[in-house]
Amino acid sequence: MFSNSSKKPQMPGRDRPPSIIANGLAITGNLVSDGEIQIDGSIAGDVSGRRVTLGEHAQVRGEITADAVLIRGEVQGRIRATSVDLARTARVKGDIWHAKLAIESGAHLDGLCKHMDNPRESGAAPLPALAAPAETRLIEVAKEAAGDETPAATSGETAAAAE
């Protein structure tokens, strides 16, 4: 009788104020939300939410997983998000798996960036390690630099056999 049937049901996590971790608050453990998280304190653990925002003095030591991430503070760990924005005050030490990435001038990033269609999937393969340079190539370069006229080592020879 008094109901308004034209109201649309709200989706979880939308049109709610963000969960705020204030400056001076330190949390040890994982933080999970289906909404927005604003971090101005420090967290030692993984953070997961729809949207995660780190303030300039925020520190996170762990993985961040979200639809959208805005970093103004410090992160030590991997970031997996559809959209990642690093502000000029951002300091990130870890890999970023993203579909969209924006980095402002002045931001610090020490890690690898990998474009993925769905970076939030936990089944994504880790980045491959780089192969070590071949020993024989190093021997060839050393002999060329020394002006040695003896033939360079072939791919089947070892350093001891080449001398």
Image (tube, rainbow, N blue to C red):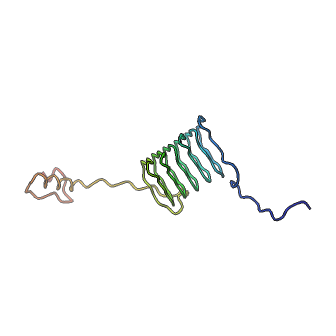
Report the number of discs: 0
Residue 161 image position (x, y, % from top left)? 15, 53
- Nearer to the camera, 144 or 156: 144
Instruction: Please state the horizontal and vertical placement of residue 158, each as a whole percent of the image.
Output: 19, 53
Q: Residue furthest bottom?
A: 6
Residue at image position (70%, 51%) is 16
Tell which of 159 and 40 is nearer to you: 40
Q: Quadrant of the N terminus?
A: bottom right
Residue 122 as seen in the image, left or right of residue 20: left
Residue 23 lies left or right of residue 144; in this view the side is: right
Q: Position of residue 55 (x, y in %)?
A: 56, 44
Instruction: Left or right? Give the position of 11 relative to 64.
Output: right
Snapshot quadrant of residue 128: bottom left
User: Residue 125 at what x, y percent from top left?
Assistant: 47, 57
Which residue lies at the image location 49% right of the left edge and 61% below the top edge?
Answer: 116
User: Which residue is drawn at the image coordinates 58% and 48% (left, top)?
Assistant: 53
The residue that appears at 9% across and 54% down in the rendered structure is 147
Between 116 and 90, the one nearer to me in the picture? 90
Residue pushed farthest left? Answer: 149
**Farthest right residue in view:** 1
